Amino acid sequence: MRIGELAERIGASTRSLRYYEEQGLLSPSRDSNGYRDYDEAALVRARNIKELLDVGLTTDDVLRYAELGCLERPLTTAPRCRGELNTARERLESLDRRISRLQEVRDRLAQHSGELEASMAPAGARYTATSRTRRDQDGASG
């Protein structure tokens, strides 16, 4: 099958398939006129590559899967490779660390934004807001 048909069958762009080839993830044969020719094994492999990239693995991660022989059968039906589990765990740990750092940055930014907003408010508005808060608290307790 040609690149356009393969792209359509796996829900990817032809550019993505060329990228997979550039990264050494996919190696199509060429027919006599130089067009890429993909067989059913390439279809399975390309679908697996796309699925793994879609869940957040990197091309280096997927190359590790390929080296372990984990891309040759559908991921949903093939016995899992031991290395596949390790790669997924490593990637999850990396993502968790990244999420934690991003949450810290977000929290600092929100705090800084609130401080800036408070410092930029006119003095009367700050007094009014403070007075309202005190009245609300007094009303709630009294």
Image: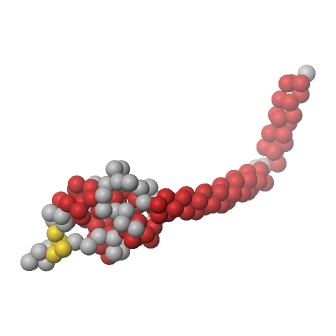
Question: Where residue 101 appears, x then y in whole percent?
Answer: 65, 60
Vertical position of residue 41 compared to residue 34: above or below = above
Q: Residue at x 34, y 75 (%)?
A: 24
Left or right of residue 13, residue 84 in this image: right
Vertical position of residue 3 compared to residue 80: above or below = below
Q: Residue furthest left?
A: 32
- Can you say which quadrant of the picture contains the N terminus? bottom left
Name the residue nearer the viewer: 77 or 17. Answer: 77
Q: Can the viewer see residue 19?
A: no
Q: Can the viewer see residue 139?
A: yes
Q: Residue at x 23, y 62 (%)?
A: 41
Q: Residue furthest top?
A: 142
Q: How is the image coloured?
A: secondary structure
Vertical position of residue 99 compared to residue 34: above or below = above
Name the residue nearer the viewer: 133 or 43. Answer: 43
- Can you say which quadrant of the picture contains the C terminus? top right
Q: Residue at x 87, y 34 (%)?
A: 134
Question: Where residue 136 appears, x then y in whole percent?
Answer: 83, 29
Question: Where residue 122 appears, x then y in whole percent?
Answer: 78, 49
Number of residue marks = 0
Question: Where residue 72 appears, x then y in whole percent?
Answer: 30, 62
Left or right of residue 66, residue 8 in this image: left
Vertical position of residue 18 compared to residue 53: above or below = below
Query: Residue 64 is drawn in which quadrant?
Result: bottom left
Q: Residue at x 11, y 74 (%)?
A: 31
